[in-house]
Amino acid sequence: MAAIDVDRAEAVAALLKKMELRQDDYLNPEFYPPPGDSRESQLAYFTAMVAIDHRTSTPWESFEGYIGGRFYHGADALYRLGRILYDSGFFTAERLAQLTPKDAAPLFTIGGKTVWDFYTRVYLLRDLGGRAVASGGFEKMLPDTLESLQRALAKARAYEDPVGKKVMLLAKFLHGRRLVEFRDVDRAEVAVDNHLSRVAYRLGIVEVDYDFLTSGVEVSREEDIKLREVVKTAWRIVSRFGDIHPFKLDDYLWKFGRSTCSREKPQCGACLFREVCKAHALSRYPPEHLHLTTWYY
């Protein structure tokens, strides 16, 4: 179904290496809590928000609107709403464990519209909160190695993705905020979502049949997992060729996929990869593979 082009991965890595990428510190007060707050409060916020950080829009409706006179879309809207609720004490293990749809509505509603899988996200937060309570809080729930973190969080429904998108996204936040100093941070991976998959297909570091990607046919859960595993491996190769830590690479690719290499209108004129990009060479810009019904990413 998919194959990795190692030569093209090396060419992409060479360009990325010249950029001297940096990892974000995740201190923007619009989206993240104050760094001086208690460690338990910060861990609760990031673990809960990542638990519900998956596709907010569908082909039929978008999750977007104005908050305080400013327009927010997708993940930005979700984290802005979360940051506002944080100040009310919303993010504690006990409150999440007892969360009701009424209590959760402000986190998932913008512009009069509620996110498409509202009740699923409420359930994911309740499940996570219950597990945190049973562990004695988020500080005790989250270990200081990536290997142990994956094992601990895999028990929570929100984090059960075999490809580990949400686990690695959470680890990236905790590492960047210096909330957890992972002793095995060299085991990090990128958090594979639709943006990282699409960019990999277009650059050609992962080769997938163009007609398959543009068919509009949704892949199965098993096919989705296999494809994202290949994408993860391809970005691992790029990371090692370019000597770029996966967390730095993930930050860059997520922003790049949302802005420059967007699904509908890729901005090739502003793209630093166009000379090595397969899609640009062929003038064919496939989307990511289609898999909508998931809370994995």
Image (cartoon, rainbow, N blue to C red):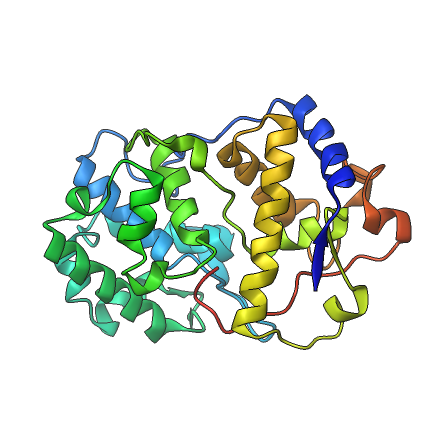
Q: Position of residue 232 (x, y in %)?
A: 57, 48
Q: Position of residue 148 (x, y in %)?
A: 29, 44
Write down the quadrant of residue 216 in the picture.
bottom right
Q: Position of residue 213 (x, y in %)?
A: 73, 67
Image vertical order of residue 4 relative to residue 54, above or below: above
Image vertical order of residue 3 relative to residue 143, above or below: below
Q: Is residue 46 left or right of residue 254?
A: left
Asked whether residue 67 appears in the rendered view, the answer is no
Q: Position of residue 33 (x, y in %)?
A: 29, 39
Asked whether residue 264 appears in the rendered view, the answer is yes
Image vertical order of residue 184 relative to residue 18, above or below: below
**Count of number-bearing discs:** 0
Q: Is residue 31 left or right of residue 211?
A: left
Q: Nearer the viewer, residue 176 or 212?
A: 212
Q: Is residue 281 left or right of residue 118?
A: right
The residue under the point 37% across, 41% down is 171
Q: Nearer the viewer, residue 3 or 286?
A: 3
The residue under the point 25% across, 42% down is 43
Toward the right, the furthest residue is 282
* Quadrant housing the N terminus: bottom right
Write down the quadrant of residue 40 in the picture.
top left
